[in-house]
Image (tube, rainbow, N blue to C red):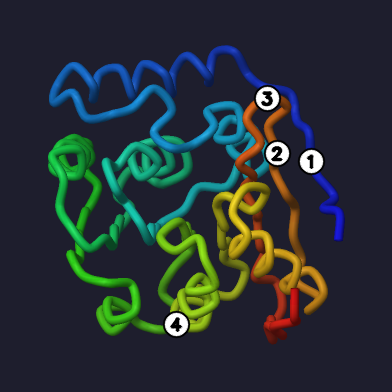
């Protein structure tokens, strides 16, 4: 199946803001890569797509060095938002991001464990924005199964790498055929792909053979 992609204008000012946030982090602890394992162009396009909405609770699966957690918490979340990151290990980048966001007034919590067990810390219908970026093989289906019930009605789920990794491509295809409301953000240069799932109706994910 070919995805319908949304190509949005990229704001030069916002691009520079993201680059500056990452550059500041790199100076502090030399942990951020140039693109934080994300496409900056896609992050800007995502911001433009979701505006003017701001989120009160944000959960990220697969924090790694913390680049995307920092960007999305800064650009997409309310000043006093609850931020939760889940990963199997703590990194210097995560420590830097937690300190920076807490100084700005956000409530940041990390659960250092596998996504397959960390779901127990979260209540159902408690998340405004969920970013799934931990597993890129078929294990991503299990992440969806465990964390989708945690998302509020009218919340947003982001699936990363839907144009790159087979598991992410497969679940995105299955969500589309299952009737989910969606858009796909795709860079014109570095096509990693961000799938946006709008939780405006109940989604009964049906896994197909690929």
For this view, does 191 lie left or right of residue 143? right
> Label 1 to label 2, Cα distance in Å?
7 Å
Of marks 4 and 3, the one in the foreground: 3
In the image, is residue 123 above or below residue 26? below
Mark 4 crowdedness (10 Å alpha carbons): few <14, some 14-19, many ≥20: some
* Residue where numbered disc 1 is placed: 6
Which of disc 2 and disc 1 is earlier in sequence? 1
> Label 1 to label 4, Cα distance in Å?
28 Å
Residue at left offset 48%, top offset 63%: 128
Residue 164: % across, % down: 62, 48
Residue 83, image quadrant: bottom left
For this view, does 109 lie left or right of residue 48? left
Q: Which mark is residue 146?
A: 4
In the image, is residue 199 above or below residue 185? below
Of marks 2 and 3, the one in the foreground: 3
Locate the N terminus by quadrant: bottom right
Label 1–label 2 contact, CB within 8 A: yes
Residue 6: % across, % down: 79, 41
Label 2–label 3 contact, CB within 8 A: no
> Label 4 to label 3, Cα distance in Å?
33 Å
Label 3–label 1 contact, CB within 8 A: no
Residue 171: % across, % down: 65, 69
* Residue where numbered disc 2 is placed: 186
> Label 3 to label 1, Cα distance in Å?
14 Å
Which of disc 4 and disc 1 is earlier in sequence? 1
For this view, does 170 lie left or right of residue 153? right
> Label 2 to label 3, Cα distance in Å?
9 Å
Q: Which mark is residue 189?
A: 3
Label 4–label 3 contact, CB within 8 A: no
């Amino acid at each position: 199946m070919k995805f319908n992609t949304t190509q949005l204008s990229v704001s030069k000012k916002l691009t520079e803001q993201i680059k500056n946030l990452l550059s500041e982090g790199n100076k502090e602890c030399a942990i951020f890569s140039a693109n934080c394992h994300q496409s900056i162009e896609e992050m800007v396009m995502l911001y433009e797509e979701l505006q003017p909405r701001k989120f009160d609770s944000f959960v990220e699966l697969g924090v790694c060095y913390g680049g995307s957690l920092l960007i999305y918490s800064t650009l997409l979340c309310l000043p006093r938002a609850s931020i939760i990151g889940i990963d199997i290990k703590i990194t210097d980048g995560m420590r830097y991001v937690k300190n920076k966001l807490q100084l700005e007034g956000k409530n940041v919590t990390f659960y250092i464990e596998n996504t397959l067990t960390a779901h127990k810390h979260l209540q159902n219908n408690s998340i405004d924005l969920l970013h799934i970026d931990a597993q890129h093989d078929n294990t991503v289906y299990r992440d969806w199964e465990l964390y989708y019930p945690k998302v509020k009605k009218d919340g947003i789920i982001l699936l990363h790498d839907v144009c790159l990794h087979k598991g992410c491509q497969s679940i995105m295809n299955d969500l589309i055929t299952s009737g989910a409301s969606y858009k796909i953000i795709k860079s014109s240069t570095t096509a990693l792909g961000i799938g946006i799932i709008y939780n405006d109706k109940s989604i009964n994910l049906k896994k197909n053979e690929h």
